[in-house]
Amino acid sequence: MNSDVYFETQIGLALVQLLPIFPIVLILFILFKFSDVTQYISEILKISRNKFLLGFGFLSCVLVSDCIFGYFKVSHLRQIIDEKKYQVVVGCVKHYNSEISPTNYRTETFVIENTKFQFSNYTQSLYFTGDDHTDNFITEGQCMEISYVREGEKNRIFKIVSLTSR
């Protein structure tokens, strides 16, 4: 990573997102194959075996779906970067604003060359968030190069390169 790179999304192998599926499938196999195990767990939880299997099956479906969606998100971003289907803006920060909500989440906005960026520490993301911005690097007048992806009305930052010394 270039020493002037302030932030860069680390995109590993997309298949890593699917790894949690294997233990889930193994546990489901054990639960359905060995009824004694299921019966023992059902007695501990004081629910019927069928309710336990139904509940665990539903939870497993939710977790597997999350893994699959995570896989598609990572592979889609990797494809965008590999095919260079993203935008780059170079300039200095204008109209920087940072607000803290009553629930203690921080939302930051700024503009570079008529391109507006907004991020917060409310959610986890593949892209730049408030959790990645803990040292007040982005300030009024800070010059940088930002690589980003347009998602709907939002510009999602995946790389920031400093153009001025810190």
Image (cartoon, rainbow, N blue to C red):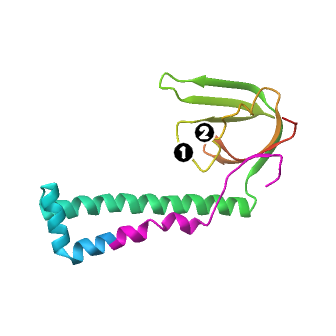
Q: Picture coordinates of residue 157 (x, y %)?
A: 69, 45
- Image point 19% across, 63% down: which residue? 41
- Image point 87% across, 36% down: which residue? 165
Instruction: Choose mark 2 or mark 1, whichever is in front.
Output: 2
Q: Picture coordinates of residue 144 (x, y %)?
A: 82, 39
Residue 117 lies in what quarter of the image? top right
The answer to whether the residue labelled 2 contacts the one labelled 1, judged by CB atoms less than 8 Å apart, is: yes
Q: Picture coordinates of residue 111 (x, y %)?
A: 75, 31
Residue 147 visible somewhere in the drawing = no
Relative to 120, 31 lies left or right: left
Residue 129 lies in what quarter of the image? top right
Q: Which residue is the site of mark 1?
A: 124
Q: Nearer the viewer, residue 153 or 23?
A: 23
Residue 110 lies in what quarter of the image? top right
Q: Which of 162 and 94 is in front in this view?
A: 162
11 above or below 134? below
Describe the element under mark 2 as helix, strand or loop: loop
Q: Which of 80 and 54 is in front in this view?
A: 54
Residue 89 visible somewhere in the drawing = yes
Amino acid on which disc 2 is placed: Asp
On whether residue 74 falls in the magenta region, the answer is no
Sequence-first tag of 2 and 1: 1
Q: Distance between the residues labelled 2 and 1?
A: 8 Å
Residue at the extreme top of the image, as rendered:
102
Amino acid on which disc 1 is placed: Gln
The N terminus, quarter of image = bottom right
Relative to 90, 117 lies left or right: left
Residue 131's label in the rendered image is 2
Residue 91's label in the rendered image is none
Q: Residues within 10 Å of mark 1 (few under 14, many from 20)?
A: few
Which residues, given as a range, are shown in magenta? 1-26
